[in-house]
Amino acid sequence: MHSKSDLQRLANIRLEDSVYLLQSNRCSSAYYLAGYAVELALKARIAGLFQPDAIPDLAFVKAIYTHRFDTLISSAGLKSELAAAAQADPQLGAYFAIASNWSEESRYVLWDPFAAASLVEAVTEPTHGVFQWIKARW
């Protein structure tokens, strides 16, 4: 079991690691960890939705044990908010589109510097980036 604060710390660490690895020209590892930073950030948000002294719905619990961003965004209660935010901020929408291409299967791909830099930028950009948007809601 992981607490919300553990997930937040892990998300930040994975994000920092992805930037470091990109700067070290370890593109595939940078790509992979940038995606995991987003996944962990979404799961930190979801952890905050659990109510004390209540048994959560089984379908909800099963839905969070995934790596799919679209499922995690829905489970986090952010689907409508993200749609509105992406419409108001097209750069955020573009960054989420880039991040949505990530999957846990990314670990089996050799990513080139452009693809890795694109994902790391989409995740880390301080004004319109995916991580900052999720972090503001966790």
Image (spheres, rainbow, N blue to C red):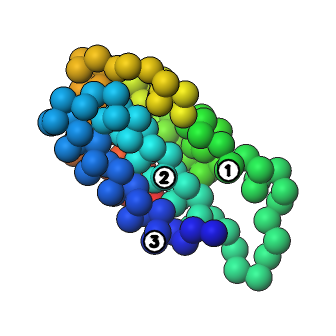
What label does residue 101 carry, if any?
none
Q: Are marks 1 and 3 in contact (CB under 8 Å)?
A: no
Q: Callout 1, which amino acid?
A: Ile
Height in image: 23 above or below 9? above
Judge by depth and name the residue closer to the eye, 73 or 85. 73
What label does residue 64 carry, if any?
1
Left or right position of 77 against 110 = right
Q: Callout 3, which amino acid?
A: Ser
Height in image: 61 above or below 92? below
Height in image: 6 above or below 70? below
Q: Within the image, what quadrant is residue 118 found in? A: top left
Q: Residues within 10 Å of mark 3 (few under 14, many from 20)?
A: few
Q: What residue sits right under mark 2 in the picture?
A: 40
First along the sequence among labels 1 and 3: 3
Q: Where residue 70 sits: x, y (%)?
A: 60, 34
What label does residue 5 carry, if any?
3
Q: Residue 17: in sight, yes or no?
A: yes
Q: Where residue 85 sits: x, y (%)?
A: 42, 38
Judge by depth and name the residue closer to the eye, 120 or 89. 120
Q: Residues within 10 Å of mark 1 (few under 14, many from 20)?
A: some
Q: Residue at x 82, y 71 (%)?
A: 55
Where disc 2 sits, the SS reads helix
Q: How far apart, in angstroms, are the residues tagged by discs 2 and 3?
A: 11 Å
Q: Residue at x 59, y 64 (%)?
A: 47
Height in image: 98 above or below 136? above
Where disc 3 sits, the SS reads helix
Q: Where residue 132 sits: x, y (%)?
A: 32, 49
The image quadrant where one finds the N terminus is bottom right
Q: Are marks 2 and 3 in contact (CB under 8 Å)?
A: no
